[in-house]
Image (tube, grey):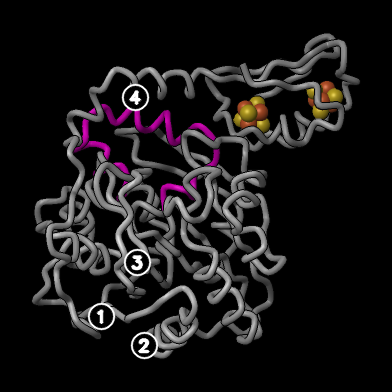
Amino acid sequence: MLQQNQKKVNIMTKVMIHPASYENVRQAVDRAFEHFPLKLKDKRVLIKPNVLRASQWNEGIVTHPAVLKAVAEKIETMDPASIIVGDNPGLFSYGANEESFEKTGLMDAACGHYENIGNDSVKVDFNPVFLPWVSLSKAVMDADIIISLPKFKTHGLTVITGAIKNSYGFLPGAQKARLHKIAGTPQRFHEMLVDVFQLRVPDLFLVDAVVGMEGNGPASPDLRDIGLILASDNGVALDAVIATLMGCEPGLLRFLQKAKEAGLGDYDLKNIEILGELKPLPDFKIPPLGGEAIMHNEAMQGMLLDRTLLRPQVDPEWCTACGTCIDQCPVSALFMDEDIPKVDADTCITCFCCQEMCPEKAIALK
Ligand code: SF4
Ligand code: SF4
């Protein structure tokens, strides 16, 4: 499997734990850049918040706009060649990239750097155990530096969602649902997540743990005031600290075991220097549904199947045969057949690009 830009792991990785509120978050961001300095002059920078779906910022489902704004403003002072802020939202908001950023307040917080990174993607080799290739947002491959902004949340399938899980959003469209289905079991899903993560390991992670989520995440109503920003240049160490704060033993999480086996870092706290105070949150509620339950939940399986079955359909009444959709399809799944674009269902990754690009609004996903 291709392991592009795989990061070398320091002997002793560091994780910063810094007190913060949304009003003073810039102080924690400045401190993170002191602990983990990056040379950004003339570099193309991608900032990737967690934008799970279109929701209000105070539902705690996405990275808080104050955190994104503080990071974007910080980077603007560092003279980069360009800044892109983007994500590919999850299951409930495929094809609703702009809407998700607008509704959450992340569009304003992006300081004019928002881009729909789902509109342009490239094929990369993947672990053939799951799929021979996947399509990755081109902005991810083009970036010199990637800054990942996970949200401190629980997750029914992976127990925690942090640094490694945030990279799942590098995949545009319904590939996420497809891979969920192909993985089939929680154990394989954990392993596949690491395969996605190592396609392009981000350079710096800052976690919004000012208000976190407990209970049945990643979209639970159980929010928790935590008052922290976490940061690291190593996602494995950072996720180990998140798990520990949640009262969960990091070594029990299969995705951390696999990440360690792959040489991406260590979850053993003995090998992590904590910059701050690591104190597990009392009585933190981790998901009531185990991974097995969520993976075999009928409603969840039905939803995954629905998403993987969506394909574009062209309305001949509106189509002018301009060919834009065919040119824009990142995986060449469209072809012209008697002046009407048709789709090769097996090749289509349901990325929604054709629908978004059609000037006549002639494409629907059905
Ligand atoms: S046919 Fe449309 S939805 Fe399918 S991969 Fe191509 S651009 Fe994406
Ligand atoms: S972009 Fe729209 S109008 Fe142009 S060929 Fe495709 S479906 Fe038809």
How many other residues sit within 10 Å of disc 4, few (<14), some (14-19) or many (≥20)? few
Indicate the quadrant of ligand 1 in the picture: top right
- Between label 4 and label 2, give the one nearer the viewer: 4
Who comes first in sequence, dot 4 or dot 1?
1
**Label at residue 205:** none
C-alpha span from label 4 to label 1: 37 Å
Whether residue 155 is visible here, answered yes or no, is: yes
Exactly how many numbered labels are in the figure?
Answer: 4
Label 1 amino acid?
Answer: Lys
**Residue designated by label 3:** 209
The alpha-carbon separation of the residues under discs 3 and 1 comes to 17 Å
Q: Which numbered dot is residue 35?
A: 2
Residue 275 placement (x, y as % from top left)? 24, 85
Q: Secondary structure at mark 4?
A: helix
Q: Earlier in the sequence, mark 1 or mark 2?
A: 1
Q: CA distance from mark 3 to mark 4?
A: 27 Å
Coordinates of residue 79 in the picture (x, y in percent): 66, 85
Q: Residue at x 24, y 78 (%)?
A: 13
Looking at the image, tell me whether mark 3 or mark 1 is earlier in sequence order.
1
Disc number lying in front (4 or 1) = 4
